Amino acid sequence: MTNIFEVQETNKMIEENNLDVRTITMGISLLDCCSSDVDETCEKIYKKILSKASNLVKTGEAISLEFGIPIVNKRVSVTPIALIGASCCKTTGDYVKIAKTLDRVAHEIGVNFIGGYSALVSKGMAPYEKMMIESIPEALACTERVCSSVNVGSTKTGIDMDAVKLVGEIICKTAELTKDNGSIGCAKFVVFCNAPDDNPFMAGAFHGVTEADTIINVGVSGPGVVKRAISEVRGADFGTLCETIKKTAFKVTRVGQLVAREASKRLGVEFGIIDLSLAPTPAVGDSVAEILEEIGLERVGAPGTTAALALLNDSVKKGGIMASSYVGGLSGAFIPVSEDQGMIDAVNVGALTLEKLEAMTCVCSVGLDMIAIPGDTKPTTISGIIADEMAIGMINQKTTAVRLIPVFDKKVGDTVEFGGLLGYAPIMPVNTFDCSDFVNRGGRIPAPIHSFKN
């Protein structure tokens, strides 16, 4: 039962600390849209998404108005398109046709992003999957709301280094094709290890083949709420700090649970999961970096940063899982650079480097996220960075991801503006020592010994 004290407390979190439901994401299976003709497949995709999600935005807005809870984004995720196009796509242009269909229906139903222009190739690429990956630069350049991802590794299968090499090249091509807009196409593309099937957050969301035909996943965020709570126990021991974060995460997740259940009921769609992720925005007071600094760091990147992030991530998960039986996705803390003013400030004063961010990804929810790098960075260097991050995920049995943006014609010291939730970012330096011989070996890095469990 929700009592009046909880209602008042929630209102305070919304009004003063930027608590919001970051996204309601409807996952839709497109497996029944497959056919041998690409135009017929596109028509089926358009009609199915329209029939399932036409009321998604209107429902989200009604719930937000009725309960007084900000719901920032309404999104759709679909079955990985590499699978849907396998029987009908003969060229990269055929896959781009599907991307344009997704973009058209996303505009029509009013969602801000549609995810699932994706391929899952952790153990190898079939010809149709490679073709789909090769289509990504053009697909992201000619669409506005389509998001793309490729899963290139897992703890069970190892890392497909042929795919890692290819996506390094794809990122550079995407940067060039969208150079007139800050290479923003790369902000809509994520490379994963151990990608979850139920992630509601973009750009990596897709609707896994293990999911029901249509589901509702909700992502909740509240860095400002957590910061406010721990500021009230400043100087207390770690036990008290962790308990405070857990209790706060519990309350935040309860808000998401309420919205998810209501959206599920009104749309007649099965409820999937709540993802409680401390996802920052450029807004003042909505920063994960500021949480870490409130814990006791002068700046993010200082000694102790990784330990503080580990504590935060674990406490958020423990608190969230007590508030809902269905917590999933990427629950924890995100550390994107461009979307977090505290991270940007730490980079600008020299406290935070790419290497320190990589260390932090060992314990955060995702990985190297929204990091702008010089436009002349070599594809093999990007592939090497991806391989490092995939190895962290594979060995540690966790999801890791890379969203790097080599900004065309920009160098270290410059800044790129993306706008909206994506914010802006300083161009960060990259280790330029060559790793081409390593990346060009080809084949697959084997799964670790502890993956053998059955």
Image (spheres, rainbow, N blue to C red):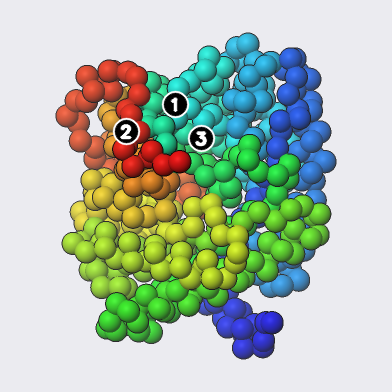
Q: Residue furthest front?
A: 454
Residue type indicated by callout 2 = Ala
Residue at 70% over, 44% down: 212
Q: Secondary structure at mark 3?
A: strand
Crowding at mark 2 (Cα within 10 Å: few <14, some 14-19, many 20+): many
C-alpha gap between disc 2 and disc 3: 15 Å
Circle 2 — which element? helix
To which residue does mark 3 refer? 149
Query: Closer to the camera: disc 1 or disc 2?
Result: 1
Residue 421 in sight in this render: yes
Camera-side mark, 3 or 1: 1
Q: Which residue is mark 2?
A: 387
Which corner quadrant holds the N terminus?
A: bottom right
Question: Farthest residue in the top direction?
Answer: 90
Q: Residue 331: horizontal and vertical position, in percent? A: 49, 57
- Measured from the top left, where is residue 273 in percent x and y? 61, 56
Q: Is residue 366 left or right of residue 53?
A: left
Percent position of residue 219, x then y: 58, 57
CA separation, marks 3 and 1? 16 Å
Of pointers 3 and 1, the one earlier in the residue sequence: 1
Q: Earlier in the sequence, mark 1 or mark 2?
A: 1
Residue 86: image quadrant is: top right
Looking at the rendered structure, the kind of residue marked 3 is Ser
- Residue 401 at x, y percent in the picture: 41, 42
- Return the residue at label 1: 123
